[in-house]
Image (cartoon, helix red, strand yellow):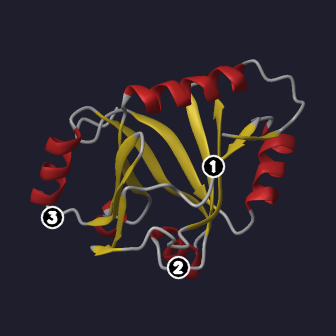
């Protein structure tokens, strides 16, 4: 558990091809099924590097979720627009992009991060949750932290995906949220 950002529950990978990444996770790791996000994201608002972006912003080409036990695995294929995901690939990086944490007090944790000089790479409000990508990798090379407000609607969505993954029989490896 992170005492600053809440418990880590998610490992998120940025990939060039989400279909190939799902295939690897399913066939090599035995993780699945993966649930594809409906795109474009229906964000109430989204900021990337402090700039408000339009609703049709090409943030994601594809994104998918599954679980391995209690750990969520997220696979992200960036869209063409500037983003933390696109920056990651353009810098020649591959693999783990961020760790997702369950915010225990989103507003207080965001204020504490800003007070500690941790930048916000992206932030937004989805219909069921607020989230922020904190620039923790600038301070020490590695991965970013995503602070996720765990509303009941978000918890219900994730619990449904986790239950399906834990009972998965290997069939129908790709599904839709």
Q: CA distance from mark 3 to mark 2?
A: 26 Å
Q: CA distance from mark 3 to mark 1?
A: 32 Å
Which of the pair 54/58 is nearer the observer?
A: 54
- Residue 23: % across, % down: 84, 50
Q: Earlier in the sequence, mark 3 or mark 2?
A: 2
Q: Is residue 75 left or right of residue 31?
A: left
Residue at (70, 69) in percent of width and height: 16
Instruction: Say which residue label 2 marks.
Output: 81
SS at mark 3?
A: loop
Instruction: Say which residue label 3 marks.
Output: 117
Q: Is residue 69 visible?
A: no
- Residue 101: % across, % down: 38, 40
Q: CA distance from mark 1 to mark 2?
A: 18 Å
Count residues near mark 1 (Cα–Cα under 10 Å), then give few for <14, some for 14-19, many for 20+: some
Quadrant position of residue 163: top right
Q: Nearer the viewer, mark 3 or mark 2?
A: 2
Instruction: Say which residue label 1 marks.
Output: 37
Q: Quadrant of the C terminus?
A: top right
- Can you tell which mark lies on residue 110? none
Above or below for 97 versus 29 = below
Residue at (14, 42) in percent of width and height: 108
SS at mark 2?
A: loop
Which of the pair 2/83 is nearer the observer?
A: 83
Which of the pair 58/109 is nearer the observer?
A: 58
- Residue 2: % across, % down: 31, 37
Q: Earlier in the sequence, mark 3 or mark 1?
A: 1
């Amino acid at each position: 558990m992170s005492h600053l950002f809440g418990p880590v529950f998610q490992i998120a990978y940025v990939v060039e091809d989400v279909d190939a990444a799902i295939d690897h996770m399913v066939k090599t790791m035995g993780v699945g099924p993966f649930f594809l996000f409906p795109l474009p994201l229906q964000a109430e608002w989204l900021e990337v590097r402090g700039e408000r972006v339009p609703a049709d912003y090409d943030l994601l080409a594809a994104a998918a979720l599954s679980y391995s036990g209690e750990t969520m695995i997220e696979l992200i294929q960036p869209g063409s627009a500037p983003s933390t995901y696109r920056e990651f690939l353009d810098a020649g990086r591959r693999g783990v992009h961020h760790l997702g944490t369950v915010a225990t007090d989103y507003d207080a944790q965001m204020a504490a991060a800003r007070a500690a000089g941790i930048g916000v790479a992206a932030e937004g409000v989805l219909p069921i949750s607020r989230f922020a990508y904190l620039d923790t990798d600038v301070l020490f090379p590695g991965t970013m932290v995503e602070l996720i407000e765990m509303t009941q609607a978000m918890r219900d969505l994730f619990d449904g995906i986790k239950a399906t993954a834990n009972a998965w029989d290997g069939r129908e490896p790709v599904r839709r949220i």
